[in-house]
Amino acid sequence: MTEPFEQQWNDLFPNKVPIPYVFKFYFSESWFRIHSLPESKRYADTQNERLLLLDRQNQIITDCFGLDTSIYLVTGNYFTLDYFRPEYDRRKIISYNLIESPSINLHQIDPEYFDDGDENDGCFMPLYTQVIWEPKKHDDLLLKIANDEIEAFLISFEKNIIIAPYDGGIDFIIHDEALKQHLKEKYKDWLSPRGDGL
């Protein structure tokens, strides 16, 4: 029986929250980013641009995970201890059978990155499911992320790889330095021209 997502996450990454925008800070040595469209264009405006975005993302994700690989898809709901807006429930946005993880008080887990200077009652409930990675199978999810409709990431604990698409590209956390450098060389034209890699 596979251990639940939260147990594997906490074993591998203690005191880190499973929220994509902090990954580049948590894992700066293993992080790099590609852009989904030429000239770092953020959003696809045409069908051709959407197809290009999906082709790029499917290609590099497959290079990381391989074919028919079991991975976790992870998203989650933000709320405070006394307030949650049901219309923002991520389960209404994507059509996966998502499992609830125990809620996390963000400040208690990581006060460095999550300090609102007030009540510090911001919480996050991870939602996850196990899926098989196959090219084109998750295009609806990738497009929703690219359009900033949802935040989600993919992780293989076996390969120790995190893939976090966002509206503009994909952040990769790859601890295997040889694989990371291979991908950066293969996809060098998709990297940011900025010195900080953003």
Image (tube, rainbow, N blue to C red):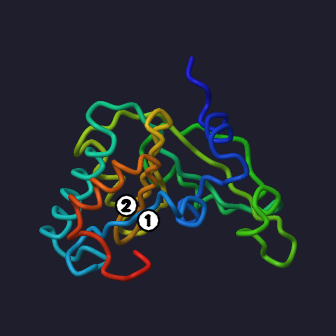
The amino acid type of the residue labelled 2 equals Lys
Question: Which image quarter holds the N terminus?
Answer: top right
Task: Give left or right: position of 52 versus 106.
Answer: left
Q: Of residues 135 and 27, which is closer to you in this image?
A: 27
The amino acid type of the residue labelled 1 equals Glu
Mark 2 closeness class: few <14, some 14–19, many ≥20 residues within 10 Å: some
Q: Residue at x 24, y 61 (%)?
A: 185
Question: Which image quarter holds the C terminus?
Answer: bottom left
Residue 58 position in % (x across, y down) = 24, 51
Residue linked to disc 2: 144
- 112 versus 6 height, above or below: below
**Residue at the limit of the structure toward the right, as seen here:** 119
The secondary element bearing badge 2 is classed as helix
**Residue at the limit of the structure toward the left, as seen here:** 48
Q: CA distance from mark 2 to mark 1?
A: 5 Å
Residue 158 position in % (x across, y down) = 47, 32
Q: How many marks?
A: 2
Q: Of residues 50 and 197, which is closer to you in this image?
A: 197
Residue linked to disc 1: 149
Q: Residue at x 62, y 56 (%)?
A: 77
The secondary element bearing badge 1 is classed as loop
Q: Of residues 115 and 197, which is closer to you in this image?
A: 197
Mark 1 closeness class: few <14, some 14–19, many ≥20 residues within 10 Å: some
- 133 versus 28 height, above or below: above
Question: N-terminal of the two: label 2 or label 1?
Answer: 2
Residue 124 position in % (x across, y down) = 69, 56
